Amino acid sequence: MRILVTNDDGIHGAGLEVLEKIARTISDDVWIVAPDEERSGAGHSLTLAYPLRYRKISDRRFEVMGTPTDCVVMAIRKIMPGMPDLVLSGVNRGQNLADDVTYSGTIAAAMEGTALGLKSIALSQAVGIYDNGESFEVASAHGASIVQKLVKMEFGPGVLVNVNFPDCRAGEVAGIEVTRQGKRDQNYLLLDERKDTRGGTYYWMGFAREKGNPPIGTDLAAVFNKRISVTPLHMNLTQLDAMDAVRLALG
């Protein structure tokens, strides 16, 4: 099995090493193609206004001056000797739950793999929720067994899998839960206004750490309760239940 490993934290991201180890429990034919720098929040974006460049770092390890989506395209169209059988994206430093999936470059790389007809899995490690630092302990301990089980199943067209590991010790994990995508119940985007040395205003955008009170069965609730969340996502965003109402509105 040929495996493509990528991320959005960049070629030097700590989670990339974790994911490479997970991939190597399945196959020796592992290719690393990741952004040259952090591209968190890139979403499913392509670089269209600038040229793409890549650099070989070592055998089967490359960095691309572009987004996670660019990395998947470059890997498949230019860098790798043939199509991969599996795309693994992550392990992201930080959760990708609920609304996060629309921003996440980690999930976008898996989406691109799915769009190209490849079995694709995104993996993320929640950090900071329980004040346990930024450890990949849970992903390291449980990631391989989960991925090994997932690759044996058929995803179906347009389906990718989003795996989120809770921020706790590996021995504290309360289980694995198949979940639906949640919805945050608070405004979790922060905009921090600051001044530079010349008095100009600039802003840092980030995410609040509040846990909220999500419904049971969602990815949010699972991770907040120290469970590993596994969510099948679909590329088709059509809201079928709303189609009749839209037809009626349009007369």
Image: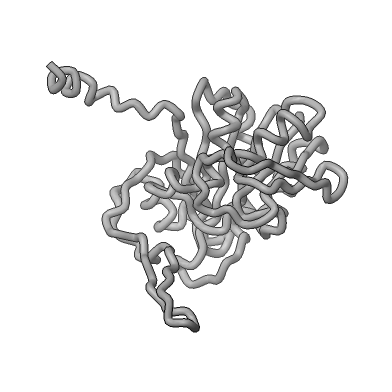
Q: Is residue 56 depicted above or below 26 in this figure?
A: below
Q: Is residue 82 depicted above or below 59 in this figure?
A: above
Residue displayed at 74% across by 48% down = 63
In the picture, residue 240 is in which quadrant?
top left
Horizontal arrangement in the rendering, residue 129 relative to residue 87 (left or right): left
Horizontal arrangement in the rendering, residue 104 relative to residue 186 (left or right): right
Where does the image place residue 29, in percent across and percent down from the top left?
81, 35
Residue displayed at 78% across by 25% down = 82
Where does the image place residue 145, in percent across and percent down from the top left?
64, 42
Residue displayed at 51% across by 40% down = 44
Residue 67 seen in the current view: yes
Q: Nearer the viewer, residue 77 or 53?
A: 53
What quarter of the picture does the N terminus occupy?
top right
| Labels in figure, total | 0
Q: Nearer the viewer, residue 215 or 108?
A: 108
Q: Is residue 197 depicted above or below 1 in this figure?
A: below
In the picture, residue 85 is in which quadrant?
top right
What quarter of the picture does the C terminus occupy?
top left
Where does the image place residue 48, in percent across and percent down from the top left?
58, 38
Where does the image place residue 184, in percent across and percent down from the top left?
31, 52
Residue 143 seen in the current view: no
Q: Nearer the viewer, residue 126 or 44?
A: 44
In the picture, residue 248 is in which quadrant?
top left
